[in-house]
Image (spheres, rainbow, N blue to C red):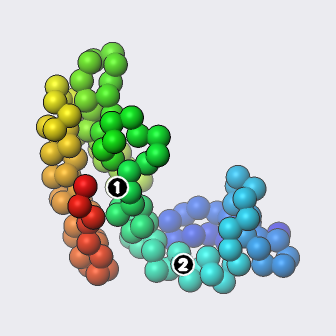
Amino acid sequence: MAKYKCACGKVIEADTNGVIICTYRRKLSPATELIKHSKEVCVERTNLDRLISKIPKNSTTGIKGVRFDIRKNKYQAYITFQYRRYHLGYYYSIDDAKKARAQAEIKLFEPILNKYGRTINAT
């Protein structure tokens, strides 16, 4: 098995027929497609597709980067960029947490997305 390293840093193994097998043992795509894809999407330690992705299915608040903290009885806003998670604060209102997340997206995501010709989706 040959190992391929994505531009983001993830190491992936490929068997002899060129099928990529990730660490979860799921078949992905041929090695040549992975390398091409990683060069287009993974730049500057950032996966551009992840920046503009939709709300995760397991989100309890329905807002990306906002969760409810039961212990504090407040909404927590956070954002992850270039492998770093930024805590944006705790808020009594879900709307305030959503605004904090949106401001952080503009500050962190917009420059790199503009550089590579992409835009932030409306949330």
Q: Residue at x 46, y 80 (%)?
A: 40
Q: Position of residue 108 (x, y in %)?
A: 24, 59
The foreground one among 93 and 33 is 93
Q: Position of residue 23 (x, y in %)?
A: 70, 55
User: Which numbered disc flags the more N-terminal residue, 1 or 2?
Assistant: 2
The foreground one among 48 and 63 is 63
Q: Residue at x 54, y 63 (%)?
A: 9
Q: Amino acid at mark 2?
A: His
* Horizontal arrangement in the rendering, residue 41 relative to residue 104 (left or right): right
Contact? badges 1 and 2 (CB < 8 Å)? no
Quadrant of the rendered image containing residue 121: bottom left
The foreground one among 83 and 62 is 62
Mark 1, Cα crowd under 10 Å, few <14 / some 14-19 / many 20+, is some
Q: Residue at label 2? A: 37
Vertical relation: 89 (above or below) 54? above
Q: Check disc 1 and report its element: helix, strand or loop.
A: strand
Q: Is residue 19 visible?
A: yes
Q: Check disc 2 and report its element: helix, strand or loop.
A: helix
- Measure the alpha-carbon separation of dots 1 and 2: 20 Å
Q: Nearer the viewer, mark 1 or mark 2?
A: 2
Q: Residue at label 1? A: 81
The foreground one among 11 and 20 is 20
* Horizontal arrangement in the rendering, residue 51 relative to residue 100 (left or right): right
Q: Residue at x 50, y 80 (%)?
A: 39
Q: Amino acid at mark 1?
A: Phe
Q: Quick one: quadrant of the N terminus?
A: bottom right
* Horizontal arrangement in the rendering, residue 122 relative to residue 28 (left or right): left
